[in-house]
Amino acid sequence: VNIELINTGAELLLGRTLNSHQQWLCRQLADRGHLVSRQVCVDDSSASIQRAVRDALEHADLIITTGGLGPTADDRTRDLVAGILSRKLVEDPTIVRQLEDFFARRGLPITSRVRRQALVPEGAIVLPNPNGTAPGLAIEVAINPFHLEGRPAWLIMLPGPPREMRPMFTASVLPLLAQKFPPPQPFVCRTVKSIGIGESMVEEMIHAPLRHLIDAGLELAYCARTGEVEVRVSALGEQAAALVSEAETVIRALLGKNVFGADDEELESAVIGLLTERQQTLSLAESCTGGLIAHTLTNVPGASAVFVAGFVTYSNEAKQRLLGVDEETLRQHGAVSEPVAREMAEGARGANGTDFALAVTGIAGPDGGTNDKPVGTVFIALAGPEETLVLKKLNPYDRETFKLVTTRQALDMLRRKLAG
Ligand code: ATP
Ligand code: MG
């Protein structure tokens, strides 16, 4: 299947919005064995969109557009595509009713602009949008006058807002693809995620032991992220499931506790999952991460069952007042020190009556480093029922990366403890 992706929106080309659809859609498709062969990003002007769609129709079997389905004047995708394919736009009564409902529930009047979203090119399949007003559209271009070899195509239009586009893709587009473009042979893909070891080390640990599977057709790829390494294994054909599953077993066995999950599983959801399983609670005392650990954990649905409270104690005074850190400890060792991290964690644990408490204190930079404690130095403490552990790390990055990496290290410290 030749797949082309068209992302529309001036904001993408002005660098004001990151084109996350490109990455997200390509990944979703690739994980199901569909490789996107071309992706273009264009502004919202009629000429740009028309040209992009016509160009794509020349080669592609499947074209996915994003953006420009809304009610405003710069939302032109629907009209332009209908024009290119010489289809009449007809009002879809179901969509009209949904729009009326949507606006009635919010006590808002429905305008003619809004009603435009109920217009559907003749013959199009409507993809429901439970998270917004503009539905997606899928059109079978059975007779494609643009294709160089006269092949038919499917053209799918998705809305711009990620929180509308992603669920729609999952709920409506994937089933449609499975039906219209069934893979010629089985494709299986799995991403195993690890933390705490570098990419080259991961490769060294697993590459040779996977050799026989690679020779049998397994594809192996590494992707390094901030503090994490993803290993993607995939295979095609009758043996695909067996190859991928054996590869996962080998990788998990060799990387051991460094593996925290697979596919869409995140480190924070692994931590929340382990705490929930063990019915244990957590509190936080954050200095240099400024609340990022609490933010990360609270992104996980169900975090409230195990996460009790987080302090952001940036000043020494707050560390004393809220966590009971000893003034003498601060004077003797400085705020960025092992004893202070320990007292912070124990203070948070005591104040909240939780099973565990994590604390971080460090020097984010760019100033404030010394020979002894260079910029990037951080102490991470984990207070638990039996003992308090403290790790010293060096994360000499820009402030944002420093916070991100420190957050992952702290969560990982707890994960390893919980995993036993
Ligand atoms: P709306 O009904 O909100 O107008 P729409 O389908 O017309 O939806 P756009 O107007 O193109 O979509 O985009 C709406 C918003 O969605 C943009 O402001 C932007 O924040 C986000 N968005 C659009 N395209 C992308 C993209 N490729 N990557 C990330 N975000 C995007
Ligand atoms: Mg719009």
Image (cartoon, rainbow, N blue to C red):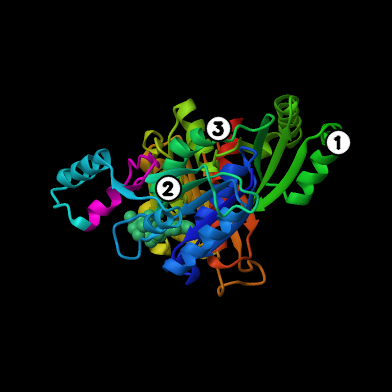
Mark seen at residue 357? none
Front-lying residue, 293 or 47: 47
Are the two marked residues, 1 and 3, in contact with CB atoms closer than 8 angstroms? no
Q: How many marks?
A: 3
Front-lying residue, 123 or 238: 123
Front-lying residue, 382 or 329: 382
Q: Name the residue under label 2.
A: 165
Q: Earlier in the sequence, mark 2 or mark 1?
A: 2
Q: Is mark 2 on a helix, strand or loop?
A: helix
Are the two marked residues, 2 and 3, in contact with CB atoms closer than 8 angstroms? no
Q: Which amino acid lies under the numbered mark 1 shown in the image of this protein?
A: Arg
Residues drawn in magenta: 113-135
Q: Name the residue under label 3.
A: 178
- Is 22 situated above or below 131? below
Can residue 339 be seen at all in this image of the molecule?
no
Q: Which amino acid lies under the numbered mark 2 shown in the image of this protein?
A: Met
Indicate which label's residue lies in the foreground, 2 or 3. Answer: 3
**CB of mark 2 near ligand 1 (< 8 Å):** yes
Q: Name the residue under label 1.
A: 211
Residue 1 position in % (x across, y down): 64, 42
Q: Is residue 59 left or right of residue 334?
A: right
Q: In which quarter of the image is ligand 2?
A: bottom left
Alpha-carbon span between mark 2 and mark 1: 39 Å
- In the rendered image, residue 128 lying in the magenta stretch gets the answer yes
Q: Is mark 1 on a helix, strand or loop?
A: helix
Alpha-carbon span between mark 2 and mark 3: 18 Å
Q: Is residue 221 left or right of residue 320?
A: right
Alpha-carbon span between mark 1 and mark 3: 32 Å
Residue 28 position in % (x across, y down): 56, 43
Q: Is residue 214 left or right of residue 392?
A: right
